[in-house]
Image (tube, helix red, strand yellow):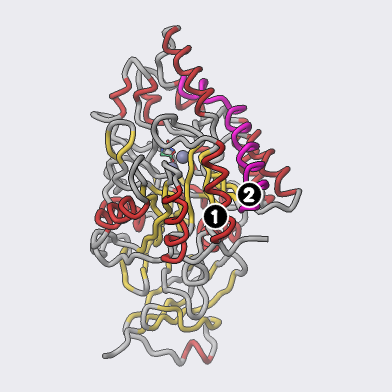
């Protein structure tokens, strides 16, 4: 069998650690070597394929650690399948997702995981792994957690929100955290005080406040901060690391900062929607605000500065999408006249790398920090590094050729996600994905999709590599 050799010539290679004017040799699906342009070493490389990256960035494929493809939720199902969602991810420069398998109440972790494997198997354009949503902590569930960690499902999401759906009380959360402390698992927390929020939901509806914007008002920032604080204390008691998902409130960032200043293994993720959108969107006229209903909710604009600051200071370490798309027609409109019936979630898996690059263009973060929060740290956090998240000898050749000067206008007309609106409709951004390789195989070639369902492989993960 001959091994395919590809050389990427002339680009600026950017990793979390370095920027190098280097050519990249890819062999057998892995990065074989890097060498300075015009060096004797690079000149000596023969190749089956040469990709010209002159004036382009050569970056690791994005690692999106938080997606929900075809997730049943809110009385409907997220509109991207593993096939359509991973294809859209590739268009946006993401080459690995970690999606959430769900334990149903009364069911086992195993059967939930099997169900999600069946959904994803032979469907994905890019590599994927799974976290496990734990919605029913029992003696058996706790034992199963140990087995899953051994198998490569090394993180467990729990919910302080959504009573009657995924909610766990503090006792259940503590028990699961204690187990994770012992088996090396990472607890991921949806930190909102769902019991208090449900009271405010009922009060708002009874008072006739039914529009989408009230979704943001009842899910008060202080109830995110309170739950974040409580989750941190529970994790301290259990001696377990903790990762707070989809942080949107500046008060929650403050809780993370305080915990990290104590040297605790507490980490935070935010999402592009919280960096670029706000309650102004939730208040758009008519029912348009429903497009932006997600939890935690969008916040007033002033929270955005705190989130960018947290990304700069490493009080927030990861930007994932929480991609959970529902079409406006036929799904979001289930909540006309009652915001609590709008399915919670937003599309974005295709937009993350570009929006964060816009953060670079706007001077919010450096180029290396862009790669760190979107590629390297999620890979480390979820036990995929250095196979994923970097460009270095031995790593999977998940490589994106990125044109930092191309202009684009985000739109549902041109995106590839299976959803009938864009949360960023009409937004102009600078920078665009040109070519994407997954393990050395072209998925996007000069802005043409050349991938296939089934190329993407299930990727078991190691334990969190980001602990202090
Ligand atoms: O609104 C959201 N975030 N939907 C997806 C489920 C979750 O809580 O992550
Ligand atoms: Zn959540
Ligand atoms: Zn989510």
Residue for point 69% across, 50% down: 313
Asked where in the image residue 459 lies, by quadrant, the reply is bottom left
Query: Do the numbered discs 2 and 1 sit on residues whose CB atoms are within 8 Å?
Result: yes
285 or 82, which lies in front? 82
Query: What percent of the width, then of the height, locates residue 226?
Result: 63, 31
Quarter, ligand 3: top left
Asked where in the image residue 340 lies, by quadrant, the reply is top left
Q: Which residues are magenta?
A: 214-240
160 or 85, which lies in front? 160
Quadrant housing the N terminus:
bottom left
Residue for point 63% across, 60% down: 467
Reading the chain from its start, which is encountered first: label 2 or label 1? 1
Left or right position of 336 against 190 = left
243 or 59, which lies in front? 243
Query: What percent of the width, then of the height, locates residue 262?
Result: 76, 49
Residue farthest front in this picture: 139
What secondary structure is found at the residue carrying circle 1? helix
Left or right position of 235 against 344 = right
Which numbered circle lies on residue 180? 1
Quadrant housing the C terminus:
bottom right
Q: CA distance from mark 2 to mark 1?
A: 9 Å
Residue designated by label 2: 238
Query: What percent of the width, then of the height, locates residue 288?
Result: 36, 24
Q: Is residue 286 magenta?
A: no
In the displayed structure, 200 sits above or below 376; it is: above
What secondary structure is found at the residue carrying circle 2? helix
327 or 56, which lies in front? 327
Residue 178 in view, yes or no: yes
Left or right position of 141 against 371 = left
């Amino acid at each position: 069998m001959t091994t395919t050799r590809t050389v990427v010539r002339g680009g600026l290679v950017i990793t979390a650690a370095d920027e190098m004017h280097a050519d990249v040799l890819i062999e057998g699906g892995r990065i074989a070597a890097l060498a300075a342009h015009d060096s004797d070493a690079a000149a000596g490389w023969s190749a089956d394929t040469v990709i010209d990256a002159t004036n382009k960035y050569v970056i690791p494929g994005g690692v999106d650690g938080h997606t929900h493809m075809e997730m049943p939720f809110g009385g409907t199902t997220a509109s991207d399948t593993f096939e359509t969602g991973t294809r859209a991810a590739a268009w946006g420069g993401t080459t690995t997702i970690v999606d959430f398998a769900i334990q149903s109440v009364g069911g086992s972790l195993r059967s939930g995981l099997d169900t999600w494997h069946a959904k994803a198997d032979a469907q994905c354009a890019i590599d994927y792994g799974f976290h496990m949503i734990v919605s029913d902590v029992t003696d058996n569930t706790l034992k199963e957690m140990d087995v899953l960690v051994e198998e490569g499902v090394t993180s467990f999401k729990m919910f302080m929100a959504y009573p009657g759906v995924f909610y766990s009380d503090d006792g259940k959360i503590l028990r699961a955290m204690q187990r994770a402390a012992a088996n090396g698992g990472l607890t991921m927390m949806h930190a909102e005080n769902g019991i208090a929020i449900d009271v405010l939901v009922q009060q708002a509806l009874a008072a006739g406040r039914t529009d989408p914007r009230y979704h943001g008002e009842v899910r008060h920032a202080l109830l995110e901060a309170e739950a974040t604080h409580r989750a941190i204390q529970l994790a301290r008691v259990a001696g377990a690391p903790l990762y707070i998902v989809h942080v949107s409130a500046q008060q929650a960032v403050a809780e993370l900062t305080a915990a990290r200043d104590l040297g605790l293994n507490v980490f935070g993720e935010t999402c592009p929607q919280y960096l670029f959108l706000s309650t102004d969107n939730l208040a758009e006229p008519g029912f348009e605000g429903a497009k932006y209903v997600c939890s935690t909710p969008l916040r007033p604009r002033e929270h955005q500065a705190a989130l960018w600051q947290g990304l700069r200071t490493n009080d927030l370490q990861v930007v994932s999408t929480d991609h959970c798309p529902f079409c406006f027609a036929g799904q979001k409109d289930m909540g006309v006249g009652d915001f609590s019936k709008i399915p919670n979630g937003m599309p974005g898996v295709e937009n993350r790398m570009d929006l964060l690059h816009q953060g670079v263009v706007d001077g919010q973060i450096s180029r290396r920090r862009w790669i760190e929060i979107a590629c390297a740290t999620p890979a480390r956090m979820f036990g995929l590094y250095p196979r994923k998240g970097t460009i270095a000898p031995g790593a999977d050749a998940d490589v994106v050729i990125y044109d930092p000067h191309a202009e684009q206008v985000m739109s549902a007309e041109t995106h590839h996600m299976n959803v009938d609106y864009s949360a960023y409709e009409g937004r102009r951004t600078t920078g665009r994905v040109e070519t994407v390789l997954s393990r050395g195989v072209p998925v996007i070639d000069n802005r043409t999709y050349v991938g296939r369902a089934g190329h993407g492989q299930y990727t078991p993960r190691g334990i969190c590599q980001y602990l202090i």
